[in-house]
Image: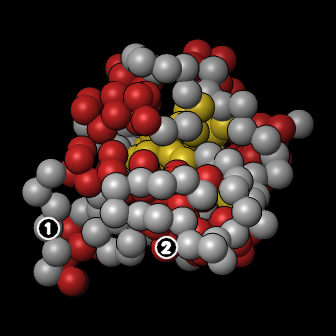
Amino acid sequence: MIPARWLGVGITSPALRHPGAIGSTLDELSNARAILGFGVGGVASLGPFALTVDRPIAVIRDAVRLARAVIRRERFEGYEPPVHAAPARDVPIFIRGRGEQMNRLASREADGVFLSGFDLAALDVPIEWARSVRDIDVALFASARFNADAPDDPTSLCGEPGAVAAGMHRLVDRHQPSTIGLALVDGGGALSMMERAIAAVHEFRS
């Protein structure tokens, strides 16, 4: 189970930032209270830099291994811990991926997975991938749509905050994730979405 004191700030792509630098910087800035997340990145994040990733599984695998070595102050291929390196720590590393192989990689190499954007009625499949090798943490993020005219979307919990909270309870009861959150996808005003999301989470926890 993910301790409440940990801060998860989503994912970053090792194609955009060196995984060793990400690991050491995030660890130092958070005083070992952050979760490090890696994902390949899509067109929206890589496209502006004219970047592509030909071997995404290998890229994420190597990023996890290198970042972990830096954080733990261990040798790795092409990396030797400098004398001024921060003290060794143990920071959880998560992977975010949509496909089977990426989630199976997380089960082999990572401490957890971020699952989002899946059909909520078919979550058993990606969760099985993520727990196929080791029973790692599953951080489940359901999309939330609060607008009354929101389109039908199998990846989203829809309705007023109370209905969204009830949907969160159903997901937790069925899948037993380590943690659950909401991804705001309405496309409306940010403040309004956040207020409704906070209301939904408050009702979920009460």
Name the image colouring: secondary structure
Q: Position of residue 65 (x, y in %)?
A: 42, 48
Q: Could you tell which of marks 1 and 2 lies nearer the N-terminus?
A: 2
Q: Residue at x 67, y 37 (%)?
A: 179
Q: Is residue 119 left or right of residue 36?
A: left
**Secondary structure found at label 2:** helix
The quarter of the picture where the C terminus appears is top right
Q: Nearer the viewer, residue 119 or 25?
A: 25
What residue did someone put label 1 on? 52
Amino acid at circle 2: Ala
Q: Are marks 1 and 2 in contact (CB under 8 Å)?
A: no
Q: Residue furthest left?
A: 54
Q: Position of residue 64 (x, y in %)?
A: 43, 50
Q: Position of residue 189 (x, y in %)?
A: 56, 76
What residue did someone put label 2 on? 21
- Few, some or many residues within 10 Å of mark 2 (<14, 14–19, 20+): some
Q: Which mark is residue 32?
A: none
Amino acid at circle 1: Thr
